[in-house]
Amino acid sequence: MEKIKMITPIVEMDGDEMTRILWRWIKEILIEPYVELKTEYYDLGLVERDKTDDEVTVKSAEATKKYGVAVKCATITPNAQRVQEYNLKKMWKSPNGTIRRILDGTVFRAPILADGITPYVPSWKAPIVLARHAYGDIYNSVEDKVQKGQNAYLLITDANGNEIRRQLIQSFNGDGIVQGVHNLDESIKGFARSCFNYALENKIPMWLGAKDTISKTYDHRFKDIFAEIYADEYEEKFEEAGIYYMYTLIDDVVARVMRSEGGILWVCKNYDGDVMSDMVATAYGSLGMMSSVLVSPDGKYEYEAAHGTVTRHYYKHLKGEETSTNSVATIWAWTGALAKRGELDNIPALVSFAKKLEKATVTTIEEGFMTGDLIPLFKKEGVTPTKLNSKQFLYKIAEKL
């Protein structure tokens, strides 16, 4: 067949370790035979981020603002051990956090369902989509160690540095730690509208959970902004669509989610969403079966896998040992970006290709061919699962495609 031609490039953000290996194979085996791939490439591997003082991450985010669609491989956020391992100049911040800060917006994560992969929570019959605010909280925090006898204050000044008010956080009678977090009304408003629009588009109810009984200013601001925007802009539309919006405490949401049948949009603050998306993904079967997209308020899209760089498999790969690494979420990052690019540039063949690649991937699993992480979860009458290594799985999908 003639290769599908693209018009506008996708911003391609390469990553680290085993996912970097899978990234190259996915392009070679599943995409490039069919698509004349047009990307603006940025190497977000840890070595290159260190070499450029993380400027490459900023440039990739700015390119996403320019071109509108990006696809990102999983990357390492270095801790002290990684600084030593890679001989880094410093402990660089999360590239995801940097990109989210520049683009703002909301991360939507949805499980990838396949017949035969049974969720650990028996009542979950439909997807639980998790919306994660992508700005502020501990990801843009300031923190420090404090010694015994020192005091920490929350200090507010005007633009000229004149003190407006201060609050004592703690007088330390022993060594300790302190952290300051923030958020912006405009970011929360963009978050709210992104979530309400997603719920309307997909016709699913929407639940927001926070802890306003404890955090009477910070979390309460989320509650109030969502309530105001819902009442002013969305309540009638939700009623017409036959869906609803609900706010309740985060612990109540967790209890309700565990009893639910799914089919909801669960809206979380940044840290809550980081944790709960992994819980939801694992409960549906595997972190390798969770799609993720960052949507900015002005309609820019960055697609990625919801999991990390699969370090353990990478070191096996370096030794020449066989791995069986689940590449489904990384495939979904590419299909999401290609479909969105095709939609924005009016290339129906590109959208169709992306959907067929997704269908081929799911069908391959449903017919019993999968990576090792899915074998214990697969239960389908008349089908005995076959474990494939990382590359065999991609070639099996290519057959189906």
Image (tube, rainbow, N blue to C red):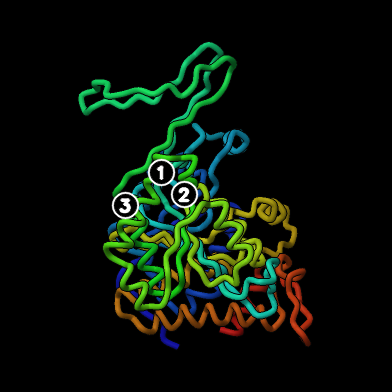
Mark 3 and mark 2 lie on one chain; the one further toward the N terminus is 3
Mark 1 and mark 2 lie on one chain; the one further toward the N terminus is 1
> Is residue 30 rendered to the left or right of residue 369?
left
- Quick check: 41 above or below 56? below
Tell which of 252 and 361 is nearer to you: 252
Query: Residue drawn at (43%, 53%), measured in percent from left and top?
Result: 133
Residue occupied by mark 1: 136
> Is residue 320 rendered to the left or right of residue 223?
right
Could you say whether the residue bearing mark 3 is in a helix, strand or loop? helix
Residue occupied by mark 3: 62
Tell which of 175 and 31 is nearer to you: 175
> Residue type at mark 1?
Gly
As measured in the structure, the alpha-carbon distance from the residue carrying label 3 to the one carrying label 2 is: 22 Å
Percent x, y of residue 137: 44, 42
| Mark identifier at residue 270 | 2
As measured in the structure, the alpha-carbon distance from the residue carrying label 3 to the one carrying label 1 is: 19 Å
